[in-house]
């Protein structure tokens, strides 16, 4: 799964990577957690046609048919091989896809330690070896309350792990190549089967991982120490 990630970049770099017409100033985020509101890239209709835009959505997809928005905390990830048939994700997979920008993500590995369970979890920070931006494949939806208020939210798709991630977890986020952005965001592409090739694990040769402090376990901490190599 993907339960924490970072977005530490300059807005100019974000705009260049995702070909955004406009990009606002972004706070540096070292420890993004579920239910927080964070930027995603969507294709939005405008007077000049469809354009990529940066939108702030809540992490944890709330299906449009949900009775209670609290369900979103359980919907932070969607298994890519099941999304086309799951009620919560099948419509977004066809019509409401987004890119979730990131500079890295976290996974936890069980290691021996003196705890009641007999083991502890060591967090690792995973990023591209070339330190370029990462784009997770995301799905979004819009939920409306009875009073007319709306919440837009998203989920990150996951796939089987590559050899780098496998010792840490049995899932990893779907990471899209830059050449796949156009297809992924294309509103005319509504055949889920044609998207399946994009769900392959990102090459392990292009990624790197290092252990970090358990500081990242606490959502109150959101600073550079969360991604630095543990000493």
Image (tube, grey):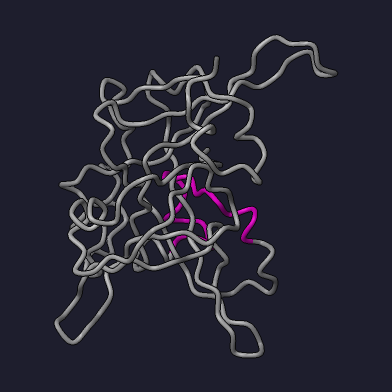
Of residues 37 and 139, the one drawn nearer to the viewer in this rendering: 37
Residue 79 x/y as whole percent? 48, 45
Question: Dividing the picture into quarters, in which one does residue 23 lie?
Answer: bottom left
Q: x, y percentage for residue 102? A: 38, 45
Report the residue at 44% width, 66% height from top: 56
| Quadrant holding the C terminus | top right
Q: Look at the image and give the residue range highlighted in magenta.
A: 72-90
Farthest residue to the bottom: give it. Answer: 147
Q: Residue at x 28, y 33 (%)?
A: 131
Instruction: Please name whichever residue, 93 or 206, is drawn nearer the observer in this view of the structure.
Output: 206
Residue 89 located left or right of residue 48? right
The structure residue drawn at horizontal position 48% and vertical position 21%, both measured from the top left corner, is: 229
Residue 150 image position (x, y, % from top left): 55, 80
* 213 lies left or right of 55: right
Q: Is residue 19 above or below residue 80?
A: below
Residue farthest right in this picture: 116
């Amino acid at each position: 799964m993907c339960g924490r990630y970072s977005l530490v970049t300059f807005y100019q770099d974000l705009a260049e990577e995702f070909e955004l017409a406009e990009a606002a100033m972004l706070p540096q985020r070292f420890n993004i957690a579920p239910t927080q509101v964070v930027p995603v890239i969507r294709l939005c209709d405008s007077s000049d046609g469809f354009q990529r835009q940066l939108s702030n959505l809540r992490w944890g997809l709330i299906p449009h048919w949900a009775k209670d928005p609290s369900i979103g905390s359980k919907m932070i990830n969607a298994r890519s091989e099941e999304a086309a048939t799951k009620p919560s994700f099948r419509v977004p997979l066809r019509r409401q896809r987004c890119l979730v920008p990131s500079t890295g993500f976290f996974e936890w590995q069980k290691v021996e330690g003196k705890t009641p369970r007999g083991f502890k979890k060591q967090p690792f920070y995973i990023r591209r070896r070339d330190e370029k931006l990462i784009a997770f494949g995301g799905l979004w939806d819009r939920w409306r309350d009875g009073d007319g208020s709306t919440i837009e939210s998203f989920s990150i798709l996951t796939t089987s792990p590559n050899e780098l991630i496998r010792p840490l977890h049995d899932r990893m986020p779907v990471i899209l190549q830059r050449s796949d952005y156009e297809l992924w965001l294309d509103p005319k592409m509504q055949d889920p089967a044609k998207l399946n090739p994009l769900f392959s694990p990102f090459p392990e040769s292009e990624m790197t991982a290092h252990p970090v402090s358990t500081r990242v376990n606490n959502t109150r901490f959101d600073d550079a120490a969360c991604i630095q190599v543990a000493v």
